[in-house]
Image: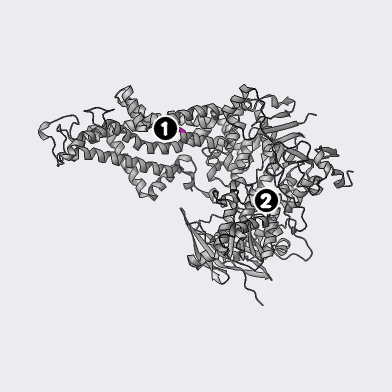
């Protein structure tokens, strides 16, 4: 029995109009999230992970335009939906939390009111009962003394608390999909752990699917069942977490793992990723945007990217993927990416 | 924070600024228009007196109150003076008044404001109270009072205009300096052995200056209006010196009797000049605003 | 042998909600004591940095490390305590006058966000040249040569010297910040989260650069960061701060393998690692205690700690030494690895 995924992104391409011409920020991005699954979208800055989320939510910068693709949520293609259809779905079925909690909250509205707004609009809660339920929501996101805190303004609260409020707002209407865009960047690591626990627990309780966007590969691995690695607007690898760490097949993924301080025992073991991000404004970009930096480049790399499924559930967009490691070998040290 | 910035072309500052300037002017045609007008005004101010067909002060009562013709493009006034020549020659005076008063208020208000914003404490309190005192008066009335008290000269008009604009510049400069007081690069400058005065002069001021330049352009239009207004009510520039404000005053009574051109053309010149400076200020702001960069 | 930097009983307090000048004037004349509530940003901190050492300073927001660092680099004055650079007592010179001090060049700092810490109107060249002009009096050709040498050592290609910060990538800006700080060859370089804003791949390069520069110039580093995994790689020793106090210190590898203080334990447990799935973590409860006029007898960590006994409420735990380790907890003995106890 095949269960329909909560969200299925197919062939998403996004262009940005810039002073130097059209930039294809996303090129043929495809992945899906199953119901109740937590996946992570991982990439460095410029990889397009946030653009993907914004495109799906329909809140792209005015200079951006979806040029191709679908994002199907519960049977509805978000990218071609009418504004009224989107208004129904946003907040109710799909919600998003952002990186900087204090700026994402309305500074002149109390936090209790902000949650109540969502409950009234999307949760079908009568206006009279909304404040009380808002307080309950604050309690469930772990804010102590929620009755008093509901009357507070965002500037009176710490970063961690604001993030909890934002989670409360996002989950108030019990959506089926949550997109979390770098929700813990800028928070202390202990607060980060608590916030991520909260999101995970609530997701489990609500049976909610989560897309977790981050540049921190270790954090992604800790919290998600599956990782989608992005580079320069492409999805380069998509695999269950354990498989990704033990058997990274795309050279970029392997380099990313090797560059994370966690993976090394000493500074000399850390390897930096060769080259740099290509200039996306170029009109002569090769089909594989990593190929110019890649030590494993072969002639075949000039062809359009494949989306090979090397192992069940493990997709790699590469013509010369890393060979499979022998069983039992742990890859958590830096796998040396060679040209062979 | 993508690496795209790394591949951007420009090297030196002025080349990049020029290209950015051209981009802003090109992107918004209105800015281009304003820039063109500005050039026209400057040209008129510089070489106007030499190229006008008639002596602006020469009166010829025989041809008084003639409407615009091919000989007298803007007609003649009550004393038979050519309105066109007077309007063009007046450009220089009004332009000088505007530039001088703006330069003066930039020095006074800008420096006082930056010091107030950077050092805080009593410097801030004193400067702010002075600004508040000035703002307590209706500004035009204050200008009138200053000119009336000190005497009807062009210098006093310039001084009065500078004084009534002091609070605006001081406030802007103070706010900008205040924001930057604890900036990372200010701390770095302290670590590098800069004294507080050096930091103010070489680190803060260069960052505040561009925003002040924008404000200056916007104020120029207001300064011209102010000077014209003072002259209109008889304080300031006196007849027979050609100045747009006086000319409007002189021609105002004649509008009823049908000789509209005496007041209309200087008024139109005022309007065009103020319009031009305002648009120029907007364009400059676009050029200077870092958010528009890249 | 004299340590390079000797910090003893250092404190920095900030008055909270200070009223304006008038109330202060009134109070001065009426003879009332200055009884404002104070934030104990740094409270009685003591530690030593030896020559050639890399010491890490970790702690979360509000622990006081930024304040401590600014006081050590003489950007702000201390409230109490001593800071000795070699044999010289720095606390005797007010921070306002330190800019022209001959020892100014001996302590320099690399800032967290190089974009913010380089004047947007300065080119990379100007930024690196500034301390050389002010502190080493270099001019003209000598200046140009030194700037170019330093830029090359920091991996910044010479053509980039004419660029402005907004024209440089994050990694290049970081290099400018480092070049500027080490151009005057300081004895102590304080690095305030220098790689926090950088991508992982750029971070590697910058860290390796820092390592290399340290070897070449024999500088000591004080590396402030909240990223434990980076501190573990770069630092010889580490100091852990919480709410203004040092709660633990010791060799970096040991502190992270066997944290002794409950806070360090929670910190280490919270760091995401490959191949773990966040189950059974040590979680901190509640919110940190208020840093305003804290009770001097109550342990700062009381209330968030998994354990909270009467002893914790009655006596502030002192920083006690166990071999090369120091811990401020009444129950430190329970966690000691067998090698030490």
Q: In the current view of this chain or complex, which residue is farthest to the left? A: B62
Tell me which corner region of the image, top left, top right, bottom left or bottom right, holds residue A201: bottom right
Left or right, residue A270 beside residue B171: right
Left or right, residue B150 beside residue A73: left
Q: Say whether residue A256 is visible.
A: no
Q: Secondary structure at mark 2?
A: loop
Chain letter, disc 2 residue: A
Q: Say whether residue A313 is visible.
A: yes
x and y, in percent, of residue A326 in the image: 77, 65
Find out whether the residues at labels 2 and 1 contact each other: C-beta distance under 8 Å. Answer: no
Q: Nearer the viewer, mark 2 or mark 1?
A: 2
Q: Which residues are magenta?
A: B165-170
- Mark 2 on the same chain as mark 1: no
Marker disc for residue B135: 1
**Around disc 2, counting alpha carbons within 10 Å, would you say few (fewer than 14), some (14 to 19), or many (20 or more)?**
few
From the viewer's side, name the closer residue of A163 and C340. Answer: A163
């Amino acid at each position: 029995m095949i269960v329909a995924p909560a969200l299925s992104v197919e062939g998403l391409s996004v262009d940005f109009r810039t002073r130097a011409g059209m930039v294809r920020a996303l090129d043929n991005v495809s992945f899906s999230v199953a119901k109740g699954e937590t996946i992570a979208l991982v990439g460095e800055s410029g990889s397009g992970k946030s653009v993907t989320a914004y495109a799906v939510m329909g809140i792209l910068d005015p200079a951006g335009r979806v040029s191709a693709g679908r994002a199907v949520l519960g049977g509805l293609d978000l990218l071609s939906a009418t504004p009224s259809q989107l208004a129904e779905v946003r907040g109710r079925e799909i919600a998003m939390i952002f990186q900087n909690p204090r700026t994402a909250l309305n500074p002149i509205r109390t936090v209790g009111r902000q949650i109540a707004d969502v409950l009234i609009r999307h949760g079908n809660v009568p206006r009279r009962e909304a404040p009380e339920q808002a307080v309950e929501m604050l309690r469930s996101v772990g804010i102590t003394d929620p009755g008093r805190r509901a009357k507070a303004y965002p500037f009176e609260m710490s970063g961690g608390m604001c993030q909890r409020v934002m989670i409360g707002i996002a989950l108030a209407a019990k959506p089926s999909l949550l997109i979390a865009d770098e929700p813990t960047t800028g928070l202390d690591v202990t607060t980060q752990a608590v916030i991520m626990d909260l999101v995970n627990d609530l997701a489990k309780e609500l049976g909610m699917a989560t897309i977790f966007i981050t540049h921190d590969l270790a954090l992604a691995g800790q919290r998600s069942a599956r990782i989608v690695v992005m580079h320069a607007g492409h999805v380069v690898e998509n695999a269950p977490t354990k498989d990704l760490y033990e058997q990274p097949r795309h050279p970029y993924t392997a380099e990313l793992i090797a560059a994370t301080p966690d993976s090394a025992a000493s500074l000399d073991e850390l390897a930096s990723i060769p080259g740099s991000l290509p200039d996306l404004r170029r009109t002569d970009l090769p089909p594989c945007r990593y190929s110019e930096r890649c030590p494993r480049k072969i002639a075949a790399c000039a062809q359009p990217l494949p989306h090979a499924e090397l192992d069940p559930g493990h997709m790699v967009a590469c013509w010369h993927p890393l060979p499979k490691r022998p069983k039992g070998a742990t890859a958590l040290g830096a796998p040396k990416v060679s040209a062979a | 924070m993508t690496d795209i910035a790394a591949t951007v072309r420009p090297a030196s500052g002025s080349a990049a600024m020029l290209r950015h300037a051209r981009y802003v002017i090109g992107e918004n045609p209105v800015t281009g228009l304003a820039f063109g007008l500005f050039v026209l005004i400057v040209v008129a101010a510089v070489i106007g007196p030499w190229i006008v067909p008639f002596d602006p002060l020469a009166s010829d009562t025989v041809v008084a109150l003639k409407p615009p013709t091919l000989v007298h493009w803007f007609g003649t006034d009550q004393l038979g003076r050519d309105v066109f020549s007077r309007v063009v020659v007046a450009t220089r005076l009004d332009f000088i008044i505007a530039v001088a008063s703006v330069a003066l208020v930039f020095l006074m208000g800008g420096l006082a404001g930056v010091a107030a914003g950077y050092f805080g404490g009593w410097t801030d309190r004193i400067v702010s109270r002075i600004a508040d005192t000035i703002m307590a008066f209706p500004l035009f009335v204050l200008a009138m009072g200053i000119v009336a008290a000190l005497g009807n000269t062009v210098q006093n008009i310039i001084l009065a205009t500078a004084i009534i604009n002091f609070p605006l510049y001081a406030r802007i400069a103070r706010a900008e300096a205040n924001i930057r007081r604890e900036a990372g690069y200010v701390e770095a400058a302290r670590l590098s052995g800069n004294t507080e005065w050096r930091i103010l002069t070489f680190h803060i001021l260069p960052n505040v200056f561009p925003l002040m330049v924008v404000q200056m352009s916007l104020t120029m239009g207001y300064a011209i209006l102010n000077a014209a207004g003072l002259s209109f009510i008889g304080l300031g520039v006196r007849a027979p010196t050609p100045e747009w404000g006086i000319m409007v005053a002189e021609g105002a009574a004649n509008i009823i009797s049908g000789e509209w051109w005496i007041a209309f053309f200087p008024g139109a010149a005022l309007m065009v000049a103020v319009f031009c400076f305002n648009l120029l200020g907007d364009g400059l702001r676009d050029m200077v605003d870092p958010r528009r960069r890249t | 042998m004299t340590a390079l930097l000797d910090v003893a009983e250092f404190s920095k307090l900030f008055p909270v909600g200070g009223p304006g000048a008038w109330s202060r004037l009134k109070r001065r004349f009426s003879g009332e004591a200055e009884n404002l509530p104070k934030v104990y940003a740094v409270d009685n901190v003591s530690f030593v940095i030896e020559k050639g050492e890399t010491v890490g300073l970790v702690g979360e927001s509000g622990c006081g490390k930024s304040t401590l660092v600014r006081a050590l680099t003489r950007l702000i004055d201390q409230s109490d305590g001593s800071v000795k650079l070699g044999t010289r007592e720095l606390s005797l010179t007010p921070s306002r006058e330190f800019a022209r001090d001959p020892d100014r060049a001996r302590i320099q700092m690399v800032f967290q966000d190089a974009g913010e810490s380089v004047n947007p109107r300065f080119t990379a060249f100007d930024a690196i040249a500034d301390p050389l002009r002010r502190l080493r009096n270099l001019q003209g050709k000598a200046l140009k040569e030194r700037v170019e040498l330093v830029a090359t050592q920091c991996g910044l290609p010479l053509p980039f010297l004419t660029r402005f910060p907004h024209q440089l990538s994050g990694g290049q800006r970081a290099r400018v910040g480092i070049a500027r700080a080490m151009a005057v060859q300081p004895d102590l370089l304080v690095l305030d989260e220098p790689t926090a804003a950088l991508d992982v791949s750029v971070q590697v390069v910058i860290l390796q650069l820092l390592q290399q520069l340290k070897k070449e110039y024999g500088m000591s580093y004080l590396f402030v960061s909240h990223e434990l995994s980076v501190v573990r790689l770069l630092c010889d020793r580490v100091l852990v701060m919480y709410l203004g106090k040092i709660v633990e210190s010791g060799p970096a590898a040991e502190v992270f393998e066997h944290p002794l203080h409950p806070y360090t334990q929670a910190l280490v447990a919270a760091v995401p690692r490959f191949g773990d799935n966040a189950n059974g973590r040590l979680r901190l409860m509640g919110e940190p205690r208020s840093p305003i006029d804290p009770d001097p007898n109550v342990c700062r960590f009381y209330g968030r700690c998994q354990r909270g006994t009467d002893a914790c409420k009655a006596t502030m735990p002192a920083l006690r030494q166990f071999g090369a380790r120091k811990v401020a907890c009444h129950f430190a003995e329970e966690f000691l690895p067998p090698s030490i106890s």
